[in-house]
Amino acid sequence: MTDLQRAVLSDVSIPTGPGGTPELRGVLGVPEGSGPWPGVVLLHETFGVDGVMRRH
């Protein structure tokens, strides 16, 4: 088992296609240190990413 790593969190916006939602907003978490790292996709509730999700 490894120690938990800290992650640098950044807000991101992903443009969508024409006629849809203007953008999808999310949070990109990148572990400190050198990679490579696996990818993780977090699907959040309608109200977006809240403080509890950011802490986990």
Image (cartoon, helix red, strand yellow):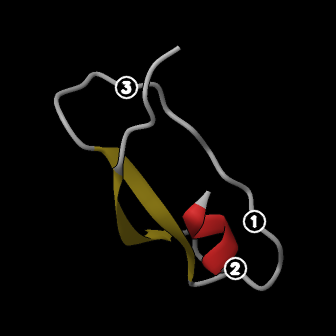
In the rendered image, residue 21, in percent from the top left (x then y), is placed at: 66, 81
- Asked if the residue under mark 2 is in contact with the one under mark 1, i.e. CB atoms within 8 Å, the reply is yes
In the rendered image, residue 42, in percent from the top left (x then y), is placed at: 66, 52
Badge 2: few (under 14), some or many (20 or more) residues near its Cα, within 10 Å? few
For the residues labelled 1 and 3, the Cα–Cα distance comes to 21 Å
In the image, residue 53 sits, relative to residue 19, either above or below, namely above
From the image, which quarter does the C terminus lie in?
Answer: bottom right
Quarter-wise, where is residue 28 in the image?
bottom left
Q: Is residue 10 left or right of residue 32?
A: right
Q: Residue at x 57, y 38 (%)?
A: 40
Q: Residue at x 24, y 43 (%)?
A: 32
Task: Assign a secondary structure to mark 3.
Answer: loop
**Numbered circle sitting on residue 48:** 2
Quarter-wise, where is residue 8 in the image?
bottom left
**Numbered circle sitting on residue 37:** 3
Task: Assign a secondary structure to mark 1.
Answer: loop
Q: Residue at x 35, y 48 (%)?
A: 6
Earlier along the polypeptide chain: callout 1 or callout 3?
A: 3
Query: Label 1 sits on what residue type?
Result: His
Earlier along the polypeptide chain: callout 2 or callout 3?
A: 3
Q: Residue at x 82, y 80 (%)?
A: 46
Query: Label 2 sits on what residue type?
Result: Gly
In the image, residue 21 sits, relative to residue 45, either above or below, namely below
For the residues labelled 2 and 3, the Cα–Cα distance comes to 24 Å
